[in-house]
Image (cartoon, rainbow, N blue to C red):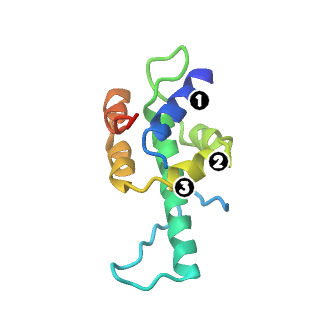
Amino acid sequence: MKRLTLAMVLVLAGACEAKKAAPGDTVVFKPAGAPRTAESEAAEAAAYRAECLRLEDHIFEIMPRPGAERGEPDPKKRAELVAQLPVEDIDQCAAVKDRKVIACMQAASDEKSLRACIPASKD
């Protein structure tokens, strides 16, 4: 679990700057140039959180578990693991401004390609 937590922090820390959505929620993005309202911002935030929950599920699927060569194959077990994550992890992911990083991570097929999506530190 410690290794998995470290992996999650590493994945999210490179791209960083409260209601939980379910992994199956529909993601709706506003059209370009649409006026920003509190409602549209709330919908966008909910969509980003739903996207991040799906990302977390994907990370549990591809990141090797302690003592195993592969990630968690069981969708029910992955859902349990995602549900145990602190809401701050999801909020941190949802705050990522460059959504291409999230898309890259979701497309990753293994740990190496997932880590390649993490932007270099600006320090």
Sequence-wise first label, 1 or 3: 1
Residue at the (42%, 56%) spot, across then down: 97
User: Residues at badges 1 and 3 in contact (C-beta under 8 Å)?
Assistant: no
Sequence-wise first label, 2 or 1: 1
The N terminus sits in image quarter: top right
Q: Residue furthest front?
A: 123
The local secondary structure at tag 2 comes to helix
Above or below, comparing residue 113 to residue 36 in the picture = above
User: Residues at badges 2 and 1 in contact (C-beta under 8 Å)?
Assistant: no
Query: Can residue 5 be spotted in the picture?
Result: yes
Residue 23's label in the rendered image is 3
Residue at the (59%, 53%) spot, across then down: 91
Please name whichever residue, 122 or 40, is drawn nearer the observer in this view of the structure.
122
The local secondary structure at tag 1 comes to helix
Above or below, comparing residue 40 to residue 64 in the picture = below
The image quadrant of residue 99 is bottom left
Residue 88's label in the rendered image is 2
Question: Where does label 1 land, which residue?
Answer: 5
Amino acid type indicated by mark 2: Glu
Amino acid type indicated by mark 1: Thr
Graded by Cα atoms within 10 Å as few (under 14), some (14 to 19) or many (20 or more), the crowding at tag 3 reads some
Mark nearer the viewer, 2 or 1: 2
Residue 101 in the image, given as x and y percentages of width and height: 36, 47
Above or below, comparing residue 19 to residue 8 in the picture = below
Left or right: 108 in relation to 82: left
Number of marks drawn: 3
Graded by Cα atoms within 10 Å as few (under 14), some (14 to 19) or many (20 or more), the crowding at tag 1 reads few
Residue at the (59%, 29%) spot, across then down: 5
Residue 85 in the image, given as x and y percentages of width and height: 65, 41
Sequence-wise first label, 2 or 3: 3
Q: Distance of mark 1 from mark 3, alpha carbons?
A: 19 Å
